[in-house]
Every structure is written in C-alpha cells, then in structure tokens.
Amino acid sequence: MTEHHQPDAAPSWVARGQERSQPPTLLALRDLVAAGSRVTHVVARRAGLSETELVTLEHLSREQIGPAEVARRLEVSTAAATGIVDRLVARGHVERRPHDLDRRRTDLHITDSGRGEVVGHLMPMFAALDQHDASFTEEEKAVVERYLRGATEAFERVLEP
C-alpha cells in the first residue's frame, strides 16, 4: 500500500473539489509547470533526442556529474543511464573523462555540440525570460524569488519518501 503525505488541513478549494477557484497565483504556477513540461517534450523532439537525453544534457550544462548520478537523478537503472550516456557520446554531445581525483570514476562533460543543442532550442525562451526579469524592480524580484522558492519546497514534498 502506498503511503501519501497529507497536509494538516486541505485548502478550501481542494476540500470542495473546485480547482478553478484557486488563487490566481496558484493557477499561474500550474500554467508555468504545464508549459515547462511541454517545452521539454517539444525541444527533445526538435533536437531528435529522447526526453531523458535532453534532461541529462540539462543536468550536464549546470554541473559535471558521473553516470551513477545520472541514474539517480533520472530515477533509472545504471544500465539505462549507461545507454542514455552512450547515445549522447555517439552524437558527440557528451564526453567521458576520468575523474580528476579518483581515476576509477568517470565524469561526464557536455561538449560544445551538446550545449549548443540545448541552448539553441531554448534561446528564444531565455531571451524572453531575461527581458521579463528586467522589467521588475529589485524588491519585486525578491518577492517573486521567495514565492518560487516556496513553491519549489512545496513540490519537493511530493518527492519525499
């Protein structure tokens, strides 16, 4: 039997089954999450990648990790992660290199080709977000950041064991 975490008290709109009566901020957040999910699907298709390959490239564009960490982050087996990495290496998007300190380990490095694949498709979104961000005052940005960090924490509650 699956265990679900329950909040102390459900918001009134949940108790009434009226999702449309959510506060506008929550509706906007739901729209953002849905759009983000569609972006991943569309960009992967346009790039000729699987969604897991695209997500792997996104992780590698932010930091250097190894194949075992890819498996953990994607919640796939190490064999599946190896297949994902093999396909990205074959396309020239990723390189395997020995770990700097522990030569038994392997680090994955995104190549210029891999970075270009991700950034090229996402640049219109990045430019629009940068322009939108610039339209806010520093005080407004602080409120938006606080809201988004709190929303991230709320999402992560679903991920807790």
Image (cartoon, rainbow, N blue to C red):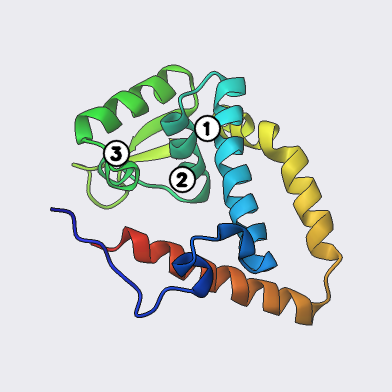
The x and y percentages for residue 124 are 77, 39
Q: Nearer the viewer, residue 1 or 63?
A: 1
**Residue 6 in the image, given as x and y percentages of width and height:** 31, 70
Kindly report the distance in space between the C-alpha atoms of the residues bearing marks 3 and 1. 16 Å
Tag 1–tag 2 contact (CB < 8 Å): no
Disc 1 from disc 2: Cα separation: 13 Å
Tell me: residue 154, above or below residue 66.
below
**Residue in the picture at 76% in, 53% down:** 129
Q: Quadrant of the C terminus?
A: bottom left
> Residue 23's quadrant in the figure?
bottom right
Using a 10 Å C-alpha cutoff, classify the residue at mark 1 as few (fewer than 14 neighbours), some (14 to 19) or many (20 or more).
some
Which disc number belongs to residue 111?
1
State whether residue 36 is above or below residue 22: above
Secondary element at image label 3: helix
Q: Residue at x 64, y 51 (%)?
A: 31
Earlier residue among tags 3 and 1: 3
In terms of image quadrants, where is residue 7? bottom left
Residue 98 location in percent, x, y? 30, 39
Which residue is the site of mark 3?
Answer: 67
Q: Amino acid at mark 3?
A: Pro
**Disc 1, SS:** loop
At label 3, counting other C-alpha atoms closer than 10 Å, the crowd grade (few under 14, some 14-19, many 20 or more) is many
Q: Nearer the viewer, mark 1 or mark 2?
A: 2
Amino acid type at image mark 1: Thr
Residue ID for mark 2: 59
Q: Earlier in the sequence, mark 2 or mark 3?
A: 2
- Nearer the camera: disc 3 or disc 1: 3
User: How far apart are the two marked residues, 2 and 3, measured between alpha carbons?
Assistant: 12 Å
Seen in the picture, residue 13 relative to 125 is either above or below; the reply is below
